[in-house]
Image (cartoon, helix red, strand yellow):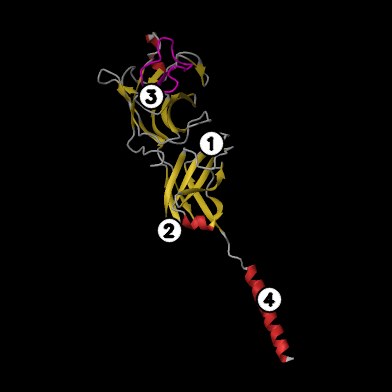
Amino acid sequence: MKKILKLAYLCAAFVLFASCENNEEVSTTGELVIDLTGLEELGSDFVYEGWLIVDGNPVSTGTFTSVIFPQTYTVNNSDLNSASTFVLSIEPAIDSDPAPAATKLLAGDFSGNSANVTSTGIVADFSTSWGKYILATPTDDDDSNEASGVWFLDNSSGSAEVGLGLPTLTDGWKYEGWVVLNGTPVSTGTFTDPATADDNASTSPYKGLTSDGPAFPGEDYVMGSAAGVDFPTDLKDATIVISVEPYPDNSAAPFTLKPLAHVIPVDAMNHSVLTMGTGPLVELTGTVSR
């Protein structure tokens, strides 16, 4: 009888132990905390998406549209602990491709449980960028409206030369020039090479009818209107900006990266070279913790 009772107690203890052990399951997920500065909201058709690089392969950490940080995401522990790098990309909101898009914005390698991420290196390094431009309207025959056009070139040698010292962008990005009129940025066109005309050289609704202008980025505002301003106009005292834009880009506003900017002096002389300064934001940064 004692042996039977002892065996019963042992069986009950084993059942209790097994039950407790099953209730203390080991978690298979962990938290990834993203804290970024300088990001702005995207157009309605695009989202940001985070990626962990695990054994050379991208693993999504989720998409987001809010630019209020920090943000926390639940990620598989194995991927979280094995990740070597974090990358942030811009993706279509409706996206059938499971791989990251070419438009990658931030990246950084993990050191222990954190990674410092930056746009420098994955978009481009704008720390040594420079810019020059002139006021002129070469697309028409009217010499009275020369202050209504801006061209990113340097004519100080007597012939037109490249006016923008900008790095080559990675895939998924383009440069875009802007003139701010009545507080509204109006595009001068997009381009990838400062030594060639911008993409809308032949199709701009604002240029004159004589020619497309020189083979450099720029714009003549001599026809039509924008931002409540009828063209031609006087661009002096307006702000000009060079931004870096996602491609494709569905937003009419400049993207957050703006490596060059300048307020056109009120006493600026037409056809004379003006020098741009550093823009309001040349690098995006942040931290990612696991």
Displayed quadrant of residue 132 = top left
Question: Dot 4, how many residues are within 10 Å of its Cα: few (below 14), some (14-19), or many (20+)?
Answer: few
Q: Is residue 233 left or right of residue 46?
A: left
Residues at discs 2 and 4 in contact (Cβ within 8 Å): no
Q: Nearer the viewer's eye, disc 2 or disc 4?
A: 4
Q: From what the image shows, is residue 275 above or below residue 108?
A: above
**First reached walking from the N terminus: tag 4 or tag 3:** 4
Residues at discs 1 and 2 in contact (Cβ within 8 Å): no
Residue 255 percent coordinates (x, y): 47, 34
Segment colored magenta: 196-220
How far, Cα to Cα, is label 2 from label 4? 41 Å
In front of the other: 245 or 93:
93
For the view shown, which residue lies furthest in the left direction?
157
- Give the amino acid type for the residue marked by disc 3 in the picture: Ile
Displayed quadrant of residue 133 = top left
Image quarter hosting the N terminus: bottom right
Q: Nearer the viewer's eye, disc 2 or disc 3?
A: 2
Question: Dot 3, how many residues are within 10 Å of its Cα: few (below 14), some (14-19), or many (20+)?
Answer: many
Residue 128 percent coordinates (x, y): 32, 36
For the view shown, which residue lies furthest in the right direction?
1
Instruction: Give the labeled residue for mark 2.
Output: 112
